Image: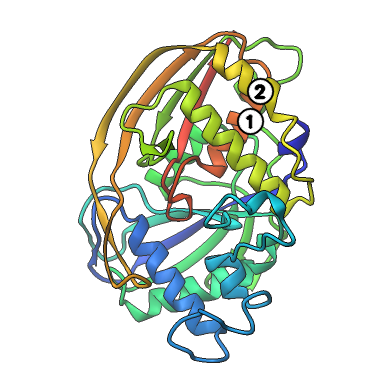
């Protein structure tokens, strides 16, 4: 687990209260990501150019580094085969599927800041506060608190907390009433409740996807992924994140025994249904189809070496669209 432990990331929960009727689609990832991106750019852009193409500040601009995340193949050879660099954050929207939330409703957004992404936490706070005041994305809301997620909890506890934002979670980082930072965020250190600790053999893993999973296998979108496909996608993501944000080299030799372990596993059950949705792309000025799948899969085999990576993946997500919350899952594992 050397690679994923070398990657520091900070799971946070942003608590909001609606100030009037809040209208949003069933899956709210594009709405929150779109609003966040627009207000982030308004906050930090110094040129006021209509787009970021050919901007002289791409390599230093906070918006570019966080939201556009340019491919710097000269600095990171691991990116040479990729059209986009993974963002240093994951944003999972409120999972309440209701299209209309009344005033006074509590909702929560899960934000995971990866590596140097934690340096931009004040930007995230400011952006969400401005977004809520404007009421332009769904409706008006206020940021009541930012908390470090209890990193000893399973991600299933996270999903419960997102669905029930009034639940108490310790670790207050930012108080929305006083507009003050009160404590440093707590990095993820693993969740021993999983039983995924050293010396305990793991023979079975179950993954339940809480948000749509969108991923390619052999160049095609996979509507019925098995354990091998999901594992390969997750390990590639962790490899890229550690190379970009943890100073690791681009050598992927460490992946080979893990990929072999995945290939030897048996997918006992894979049950998915299509989740069809689209979003408006400001860059492309058109609606983009973002269909994914929801469901679960169960695998068995010698999964001890893989379990800690899936444990980290509960926060890092897997597949495409992770910056808008796609590919969030909960894991159960046993011997």
- According to the image, label 1 marks what residue? 309
Q: Is residue 332 above or below residue 133?
A: above
- According to the image, label 2 marks what residue? 258
Q: Which mark is residue 229?
A: none
In this picture, residue 208 sits left or right of residue 118: left
| Residue 186 in view (yes/no) | no
Which residue is painted at 32% across and 74% down in the image? 140
Q: CA distance from mark 1 to mark 2?
A: 10 Å
In which quadrant is the N terminus drawn? top right
Picture coordinates of residue 214 (x, y %)?
38, 41
Kind of element beneath mark 1: helix
Picture coordinates of residue 255 (x, y %)?
69, 29
| Residue 184 in view (yes/no) | yes
Question: Mark 1 and 2 residues: CB-CB less than 8 Å, in contact?
Answer: yes
Which residue is painted at 70% across and 11% down in the image? 200
Which residue is painted at 68% across and 65% down in the image? 182
């Amino acid at each position: 687990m050397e690679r994923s432990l070398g990657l520091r990331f900070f799971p946070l929960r942003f608590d909001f209260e609606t100030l009037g009727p809040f209208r949003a689609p069933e899956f709210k990832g594009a709405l929150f990501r779109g609003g966040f991106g627009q207000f982030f750019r308004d906050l930090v852009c110094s040129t006021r150019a209509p787009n970021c193409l050919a901007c002289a500040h791409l390599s230093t601009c906070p918006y570019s580094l966080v939201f556009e995340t340019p491919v710097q193949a000269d600095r990171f050879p691991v990116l040479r085969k990729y059209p986009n660099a993974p963002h240093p954050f994951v944003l999972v929207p409120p999972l309440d599927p209701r299209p209309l939330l009344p005033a006074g409703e509590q909702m929560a957004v899960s934000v995971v800041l990866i590596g140097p992404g934690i340096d931009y936490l004040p930007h995230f706070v400011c952006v969400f506060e401005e977004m809520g005041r404007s009421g332009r994305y769904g409706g008006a809301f206020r940021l009541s608190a930012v908390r470090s997620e209890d990193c000893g909890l399973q991600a299933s506890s996270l999903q419960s907390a997102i669905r029930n934002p009034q639940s108490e979670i310790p670790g207050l980082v930012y108080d929305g009433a006083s507009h003050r930072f009160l404590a440093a965020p707590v990095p993820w250190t693993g969740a021993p409740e999983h039983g995924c600790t050293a010396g305990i053999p793991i023979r079975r893993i179950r993954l339940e996807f809480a948000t749509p999973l969108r991923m390619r296998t052999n160049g095609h979108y996979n509507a019925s992924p098995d354990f091998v496909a999901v594992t390969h996608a997750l390990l590639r993501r962790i490899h890229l994140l550690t190379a970009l944000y943890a100073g690791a080299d681009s050598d992927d030799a460490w992946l080979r025994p893990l990929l072999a372990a995945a290939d030897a596993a048996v997918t006992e059950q894979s049950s998915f249904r299509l989740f069809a949705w689209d979003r408006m792309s400001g860059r492309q000025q058109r609606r983009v189809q973002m269909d994914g799948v929801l469901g679960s899969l169960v695998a068995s085999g010698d999964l001890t070496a893989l379990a800690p990576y899936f444990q980290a993946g509960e926060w890092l997500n897997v597949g495409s669209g992770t910056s808008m919350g796609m590919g969030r899952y909960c894991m159960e594992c046993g011997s």
